[in-house]
Every structure is written in C-alpha cells, then in structure tokens.
C-alpha cells in the first residue's frame, strides 16, 4: 500500500525520512549533513520519484524509489 506523503503530519514525515536516511548502510560513507539528506528525500517525494510504502502484514513503513515498486501498487 502506498501512503501519499502529503497526508502525513509534517513532523511525522520528517521523522520517517530521518529514520530512513540514518539507518545503517544508507550513508555509504556520505558525510552530507542530516538536513541535506532529509531535503533530498523530501524533494524526491514531491517530484514523485520516491514513495512511501506501508506493509500491512508487518506494520512497517519504508521509503522506496518509485521505479522499484511493483506496478500494480501504483495503479491503486
């Protein structure tokens, strides 16, 4: 299930993005400041190149590139 980013409270969206960009393995040695990484993800969500995916079975939210999401999820 896809969650429109603009339906989340601004603080909730920021925390979700911060969680994503600070996870182990996401920085790959990148020394970019947290705020810059958060803004990059926020821009990708606004442009539609990234989406928020909610896994109902596991009750987890993930950020993903739109191109990596199954096409049938995008049709709903």
Image (cartoon, rainbow, N blue to C red):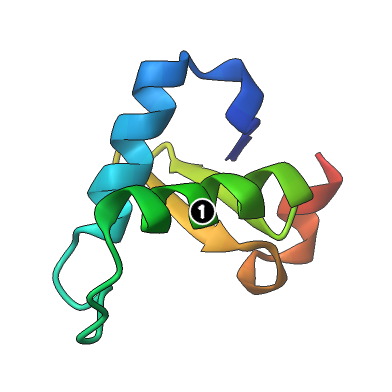
In the displayed structure, does residue 69 sit left or right of residue 58?
right
Above-or-below relation of 7 to 60: above
In the displayed structure, does residue 59 sit left or right of residue 54?
left
In x, y percent, where is residue 30? 26, 80
In x, y percent, where is residue 74? 78, 51
- For label 1, the residue is 41
Above-or-below relation of 7 to 33: above
Above-or-below relation of 53 to 6: below
Furthest residue toward top: 9
Q: Closest to the observer: 61 or 5?
A: 5
Residue for point 29% across, 32% down: 15
* Residue 26 shows in this picture: yes
Q: For residue 44, what is the image quadrant? A: bottom right
Above-or-below relation of 6 to 43: above
Residue for point 85% across, 47% down: 75
Furthest residue toward left: 24
Q: Quadrant of the C terminus?
A: top right
In the displayed structure, does residue 32 sit left or right of residue 4?
left
Q: Residues within 10 Å of mark 1 (few under 14, many from 20)?
A: many
Q: Closest to the observer: 58 or 42?
A: 42
**Total residue callouts:** 1
Kindly state the secondary structure of the residue where label 1 is placed: helix
Q: For residue 2, what is the image quadrant? A: top right
């Amino acid at each position: 299930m896809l969650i429109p980013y603009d339906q989340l409270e601004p603080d909730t969206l920021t925390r979700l993005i911060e969680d994503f960009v600070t996870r182990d393995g996401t920085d790959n040695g990148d020394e970019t400041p947290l705020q810059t990484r958060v803004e990059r993800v926020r821009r990708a969500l606004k442009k539609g190149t990234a989406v928020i995916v909610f896994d109902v079975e596991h009750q987890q939210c993930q950020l993903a590139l739109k191109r990596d999401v199954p096409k049938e999820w995008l049709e709903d």
